[in-house]
Image: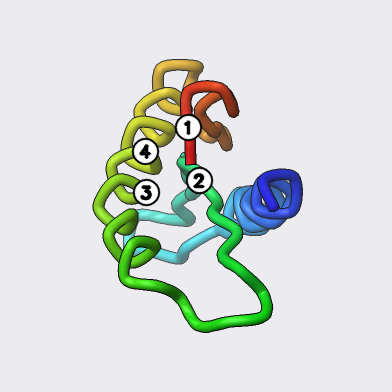
Amino acid sequence: GPAGALETAERLRQAVETLCVPTEQGELAVTVSIGVVSFDSHPDGPVTKSEESLLGELIDRAGQALHLAKDRGRNRVAAPPLEEVGL
């Protein structure tokens, strides 16, 4: 669900933040902003055609969440409010 997706994204963000990438000019610090959207399909059956049609909307929502994370200061995880998702 949404809470698990946010937790996973935050763990990933923290892991990336600890990386130092060696370059010819010295170490380079790396950060990442992550937009998160989750969708829980029916666990007892295959994904239906109508659920597949949500893919584009989910990708758009994740992009919006990414911009929200960057607008909040970068190196962040963000998700749209649940009432905005409507999925």
Q: CA distance from mark 3 to mark 2?
A: 7 Å
Task: Assess whether mark 4 and mark 3 are in contact (beta carbons under 8 angstroms).
Answer: yes
Q: CA distance from mark 1 to mark 3?
A: 9 Å
Asked whether, in this view, residue 34 is left or right of residue 10, the answer is left
> Tag 1, which secondary structure?
helix
**Which residue is label 2 attached to?**
37
**Which residue is label 1 attached to?**
85
Q: What is the crowding at mark 4: few (fewer than 14 residues within 10 Å), some, or many (at least 20)?
A: many
Q: Which mark is residue 58?
A: 3
Quarter residue 81 falls in: top right
Residue located 50% across and 83% down the image: 46
Task: Assess whether mark 2 and mark 3 are in contact (beta carbons under 8 angstroms).
Answer: yes
Mark 3 belongs to which amino acid? Leu
Mark 4 belongs to which amino acid? Arg
> Tag 2, which secondary structure?
loop
Task: Assess whether mark 1 and mark 2 are in contact (beta carbons under 8 angstroms).
Answer: yes
Task: Assess whether mark 4 and mark 2 are in contact (beta carbons under 8 angstroms).
Answer: yes
47, above or below 38, in the image: below
Q: CA distance from mark 3 to mark 4?
A: 5 Å
Q: Judge by depth and name the residue closer to the eye, 57 or 77.
A: 57
Task: Assess whether mark 4 and mark 1 are in contact (beta carbons under 8 angstroms).
Answer: yes
Q: CA distance from mark 2 to mark 1?
A: 8 Å
Q: Position of residue 5 (x, y in %)?
A: 65, 53
Q: Judge by depth and name the residue closer to the eye, 6 or 54.
A: 54
Q: Judge by depth and name the residue closer to the eye, 47 or 63.
A: 47
Q: In front: mark 2 or mark 1?
A: 1
**Which residue is label 4 attached to?**
61
